[in-house]
Image (cartoon, coloured by chain):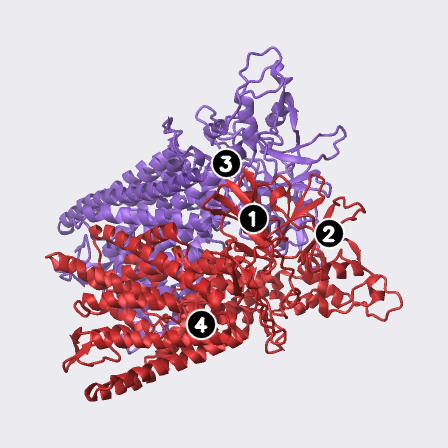
Chain colours: A red, B purple
């Protein structure tokens, strides 16, 4: 786990931040971490001088291409926290402008706002449902054509010999589709890679991930996921729905598209982080809801991943969006399937009907389920471990777009080849029933009226395969088929996750789990004489699927509800919960969850639910960043420009004080102002003493800030003349006069709780006379984490 | 809605608070509310001088009985906020003692704590499930005997004539059971009356309701609910389960029973408000889960009613408790029903199996459902309106325990009489099918092989009646039966809610709704020629039940999930959600929810989710209470005793300042200490200068505070000698050195958000030099609410 060089696919581009495009001052220090303090309880803390020394790998390849704005190669380490990620501000900036607006508003205006929030949530649900429907139909059509072509080809060559031609056709078709998807992702929008769930988790956690909620990302995500699923990769189309829903929400709620340069002049009130983040929660929930037909699961997902402050009305709106989303999908799919009004397709994946009688579980089966949960936890940890190393490898060696595309194509070809080989050598023939659910049964070398059982698992979209494993009658698969399938699909899925294609890991996990779960069921039935006791292997397939998925992603409450809703049967609540809990406990013992690993590898300052348990001995004085750059209430323009242009500090929030004294004594706090606000002020040249200038001195309004949101220009793009530098700026009206503060002695858990519960971006630390002595930001809190040697401190890096 | 005199059944008794037993200084003022300020947007605020003038009715009957500690008659007004209710402190008191303990603890100790939390939640779930099981079995047995006796009697007298004897038997039996229940509640524990949901709502909102989580309350609640259900009242046994679960949780988590004087010396760490409140959430969720077989619904109920700060681990533990609870109930019921291992009875109420095919709904039915939701909202508002006036009447005239018992018996007798009359005059005879679900079919005047259809609705436990309405085949009921049943049951249920018996309103609401819902279904089928279009009246019964329940209680997300889980079929998610939403919107237009009405009538300072929308023009300076009684860091014992004994202020939290200056100038804040802490300090005589005394000066530990929790003795019980009064007390070690503060100019919504999100009890308002100028408590925030004339301010009263 040495320090490595990587490409930051989530990093900022030139238009996102004032920092990008700058040469960040990377210092190559060989200083060893030195113990900061030795605690009685054995907590040792390692700290590196902040902002100054960063362990770097030698091989810093600075392959810069400023024209296309491609991110630099940056040093990377999972023990590092990137300073580049900015926080979202969940705290309203209650400055004079804002308060004046709020006070002008009547009760009716607030009611109208409330109604628009509902309308937006309805729209989010509707559009997310439509997108899900679009993906579903296109995938089904394209995959249908693909499987038909290949099947005909196989049938043709089975008799004549020369099946290698079929193999080449299959691999070629897959690779072409995947190439298309990978090219889009790798060359046009790397952020659209993967499921997008880690990114949305970060966004809901309060971190601004550049470009993650843009229209372009959505388009590439949708096209990309179609290509990868049709390309036969071991992926699902469910995860990306969550990302898609979030993008839809971010777009709809702002009433404009910056990419398309269209402003509909509606919903202007919602153009700030607080409101946008709420809507993005709703979008993510709508995405989950459309993907799994699980509206309640969607709400819980949004809560589990995002909300720190639970708000009843917000939750109810999120639920509304989720409901509309699954309903829209259901409705349009019912029309597509020529059964209008039939509402039995609530999600992209449909686990099929679990009849209560056939599938009822008994009390004595619960220990078995728990054991399967443990197996799922172990397999999940193994999956994550392999994927972790693979990701490190990719970061190190496969960072050029063309290499990424080639790797994706290779995986597609290998997947097809492996599948073909397995089918070819499989001797598991099953009779073709009259009511068979196989869409594309392959006869191959089986007798007439029979089909190859391995092909049902491989020669099919993964969603169909999952459903077959859950519901096909006993005896459909033999154990060897299932065992081999589990092994190969496990490795393929592990290899696939992290490729530069948009695709999710939910369905492959379910498929792996369903396969070994069904295998367990079959083995149980064969070892006991009373086969009827173990009524249905499908039940074990379901439990296995839950265990495997839980072991990989480590979601808890929301996943339970999602699984229960997807099965449409609440009876399975308890076993699924027990299984997921076991899988999580066992898995956490070995390795973190897959999403957390990927978040960590991106050095994102992610805030967990609570401060580390043993962090009570840290106080705000030690945690905070200091000294703080403060501004006077009436400040010289030149000073402001200089401070904003200083790339070595690059602060985003500045406490406003009554008067900065000459000798660096701390001064009394009277407010807080953000970089983005200062930028808008500078841009509109709201200066006080305008000697000899023709500048309009129109009063700035909230609208000006909202118009600039969220892509505030960098300071470099604002020209301030030498005369203007001498002017003064009065910040009184624009600063937040009542920022939250904590005293110096506040313990870290207390600071953490305040920060997390209110979704703050900056928390001012004051002494007992209300003078500014420090500033706590997200990175100051995210630094501390429980490692193997007790409390550890991550290093901060500009990159 | 004049001011009225009432008995505060929730008020404190002598052992709960330093205030009770005091003559509270009630001032009879006739001052009219005077407009405080006229806002541009038309907001007028009415304010009465705080703490000084309280509108009182003349008839203050001071029927005091200090020996038994019965609460006084107190003046009462729904526009009043009682100062008597204290807040729970969800904020940890991070004083030196606490921090030292936390810092001494190793990571393993924290892990052990975490494990004990899980164990406690498991225990809570298990015990709650057992209690539910006990209630269910006892009710079934007793009701079985009752119905059998009456049925035999009716059969005997149907032929012979003289059915009036049957009526007398029925009414007599019912009255006796109800009398038993009412005597227990009215004479021994008035807090056990009703469903307990309003009280638990308040508790989870952060208000300390005296005696609500005591063992005695639980025992009387359980016995009371059995009596009222067996007594044939229009009540359910589901609501009380939520209260029971909460009591179990509060007991188990503290590892001791103060009532039984047993301390098991375990779980001592959890003896503070923060932890206890978390466990009570789990208990309430377990209660919901056991009542409706709805573990997810339980979690959402706990969140919707309680949690302000969402914590993933906490929620997961709550879910665990819920799962264990429903599982325990299911398991023991399956043994009781001689089908061990059959897990089909997840809750006390079981809606029966809704098969997807028969009950599928079509798109064109959705407008119908929404219309039914509106009807439910209107009927619910009517129910609440009638019940509101009835409650006022009861507060005014029916406040003596013996009167309450008599009223309860009267209702029981009337219920039996009405039911009997309806059955008697009903001519709706239905053939007795071979697979009839009727437990006690009454033939009465029907032909042989037929039974009286009205009797299935009335001559049955309400749970069974609901199930019959949902599932009996078409034609089981005729419209007249249903219409009459709806009308009478509506009035009976409305009369019953608020009696001095423990019983819930969920089941009667469902029953009323199911009746008129089924009526709608029947009418629809009869008006259209294609009867098959409206496949099943049971579907409409379900929608009607949801609409009626939603119209009465106005719960949203949790109720949707509870209904979905109770039907066991996720297909109904969307219609149920739409119906509940419509019912809530329509109902809220007319009248508040039933629980909110009852909370308001108790003058509880309930904090809603957000500050009123139009309250941005209020700032902390106007909201806070001032002047504040501050203490010095080293304070004279005499001063502390005097301050604590001052009944006219009765503050519970005191800012600690560096030095109170002589001329009432505000001094710098350095901490916050609670009345309860001071009491413990005084009790243990932790004084600094102990001249000529033999007092042990042992160091006080956290354990001393925990042992005293939660029933801190009143100041009057602590004897402080004249010598001791001259000693000093050093508060440094015990005060919370980092209380949350806000500046004077903070807007009300901002103060509200901080207060609510962190579950605070006291929020110190400081000026720009960190000097204490005011204190914001729950009552200061709860005062403001949106009335008909814009923002209104409630009056505060000592009572």
Marks 3 and 4 belong to one chain:
no
Q: Position of residue B688 (x, y in %)?
A: 61, 20
Marks 1 and 3 belong to one chain:
no
Q: Position of residue A775 (x, y in %)?
A: 65, 49
Q: Which label belongs to residue A630?
A: 2
Q: Earlier in the sequence, mark 4 or mark 2?
A: 4
Circle 2: element type: loop
Q: Which residue is mark 4?
A: A502
- What distance separates the C-alpha of mark 4 from that of mark 2? 44 Å
Marks 4 and 1 belong to one chain:
yes
- What distance separates the C-alpha of mark 1 from that of mark 2? 33 Å
Residue A556 found in image quarter: bottom left
Q: Which residue is mark 1?
A: A32
Q: Which residue is mark 3?
A: B102
- What distance separates the C-alpha of mark 3 from that of mark 2? 35 Å
The answer to the question of whether label 1 and label 3 lie on touching residues, with beta carbons closer than 8 A, is no
Marks 1 and 2 belong to one chain:
yes
Q: On the rendered structure, is B538 left or right of A608?
A: left
Circle 3: element type: helix
Task: Mark 4: give few (<14), some (14-19) or many (20+) Cα within 10 Å.
Answer: many
- Which chain letter matches label 2? A
- Which chain letter matches label 3? B
Depth order, front residue of B719/B431? B719
Q: Nearer the viewer, mark 1 or mark 3?
A: 1
- What distance separates the C-alpha of mark 3 from that of mark 4? 45 Å
């Amino acid at each position: 786990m040495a320090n490595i060089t990587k490409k930051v696919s989530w990093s900022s581009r030139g238009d996102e931040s004032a920092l990008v495009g700058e040469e960040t001052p990377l210092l190559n220090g060989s200083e060893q971490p030195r113990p900061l303090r030795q605690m009685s309880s054995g907590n040792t803390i390692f700290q590196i001088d902040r902002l100054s020394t960063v362990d770097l790998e030698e091989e810093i390849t600075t392959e810069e291409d400023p024209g296309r704005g491609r991110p630099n190669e940056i040093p990377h380490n999972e023990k590092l926290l990137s300073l580049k990620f900015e926080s979202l501000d969940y705290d309203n900036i209650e400055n004079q402008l804002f308060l004046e607006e709020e006070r002008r508003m009547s009760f009716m205006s607030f009611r109208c706002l409330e109604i628009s929030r509902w309308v937006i949530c309805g729209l989010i649900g509707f559009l997310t449902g439509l997108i899900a429907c679009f993906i579903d139909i296109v995938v089904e059509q394209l995959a249908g054509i693909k499987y038909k072509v290949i099947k005909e080809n196989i049938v043709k060559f089975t008799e004549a010999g020369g099946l290698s031609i079929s193999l080449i056709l299959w691999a070629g078709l897959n690779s072409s589709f995947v190439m298309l998807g990978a090219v889009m992702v790798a060359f046009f929008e790397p952020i659209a890679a993967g499921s997008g769930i880690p990114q949305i988790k970060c966004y809901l956690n309060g971190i601004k991930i550049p470009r993650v909620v843009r229209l372009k990302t959505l388009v590439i995500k949708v096209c990309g996921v179609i290509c990868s699923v049709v390309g036969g990769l071991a992926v699902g189309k469910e995860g990306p729905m969550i990302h898609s829903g979030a993008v839809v929400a971010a777009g709809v709620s702002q009433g404009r598209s910056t990419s398309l340069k269209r402003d509909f002049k509606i919903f202007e009130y919602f153009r700030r982080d607080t409101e946008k983040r709420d809507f993005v929660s709703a979008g993510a929930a709508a995405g989950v809801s459309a993907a799994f037909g699980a509206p309640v699961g969607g709400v819980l997902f949004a809560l589990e991943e995002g909300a720190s402050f639970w708000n009843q009305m917000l939750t109810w709106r999120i639920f509304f969006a989720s409901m509309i989303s699954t309903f829209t999908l259901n409705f349009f799919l019912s029309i597509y399937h020529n059964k209008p009004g039939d509402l039995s397709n609530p999600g992209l994946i449909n686990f099929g009907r679990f009849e209560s009688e056939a599938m009822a579980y008994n009390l004595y089966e619960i220990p078995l389920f728990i054991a399967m949960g443990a197996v799922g936890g172990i397999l999940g940890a193994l999956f994550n471990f392999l994927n972790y190393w693979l990701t490190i490898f990719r970061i190190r060696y496969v960072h050029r777009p063309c290499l990424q595309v080639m790797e994706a194509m290779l995986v597609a070809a290998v997947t097809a080849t492996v599948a073909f080989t397995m089918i070819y050598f499989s001797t598991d023939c099953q009779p073709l029933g009259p009511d068979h659910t196989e869409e594309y049964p392959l006869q191959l070398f089986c007798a007439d009226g029979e089909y190859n059982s391995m092909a049902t698992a491989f020669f099919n979209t993964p969603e169909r395969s999952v459903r077959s494993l859950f519901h096909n009658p006993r005896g459909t698969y033999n154990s060897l088929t299932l065992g081999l399938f589990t092994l190969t699909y496990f490795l393929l899925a592990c290899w696939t996750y992290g490729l530069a294609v948009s695709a999710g890991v939910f369905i492959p996990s379910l498929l792996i789990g369903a396969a070994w779960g069904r295998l367990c069921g079959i083995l149980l039935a064969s070892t006991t004489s009373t086969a009827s006791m173990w009524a249905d292997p499908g039940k074990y397939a379901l439990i296995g699927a839950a265990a495997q998925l839980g072991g990989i992603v480590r979601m808890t409450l929301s996943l339970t509800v999602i699984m229960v809703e997807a099965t449409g049967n609440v009876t399975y609540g308890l076993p699924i919960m027990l299984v997921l809990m076991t899988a999580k406990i066992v898995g956490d013992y070995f390795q973190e969850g897959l999403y957390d690993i990927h978040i960590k590898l991106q050095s994102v300052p992610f805030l967990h639910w609570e401060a580390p348990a043993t962090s009570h001995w840290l106080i705000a004085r030690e945690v905070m960043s200091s000294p703080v750059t403060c501004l006077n209430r009436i400040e010289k323009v030149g000073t402001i420009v200089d401070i904003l242009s200083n790339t070595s500090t690059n602060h985003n929030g500045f406490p406003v004080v009554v008067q900065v004294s000459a000798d660096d004594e701390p001064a009394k706090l009277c407010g807080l102002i953000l970089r983005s606000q200062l930028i808008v002020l500078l841009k509109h040249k709201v200066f006080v003493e305008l000697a000899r200038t023709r500048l309009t001195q129109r009063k700035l309004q909230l609208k000006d800030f909202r118009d600039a949101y969220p892509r505030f220009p960098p300071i470099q793009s604002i020209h301030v003349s030498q005369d203007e530098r001498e002017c003064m700026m009065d910040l009184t009206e624009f600063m937040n006069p009542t920022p939250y503060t904590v005293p110096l002695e506040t313990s870290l858990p207390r600071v953490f709780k305040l920060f997390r519960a209110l979704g703050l971006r900056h928390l001012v630390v004051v002494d007992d006379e209300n003078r500014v002595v420090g500033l706590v930001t997200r990175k100051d809190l995210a630094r501390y984490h429980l490692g193997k040697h007790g409390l550890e401190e991550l290093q901060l890096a500009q990159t």
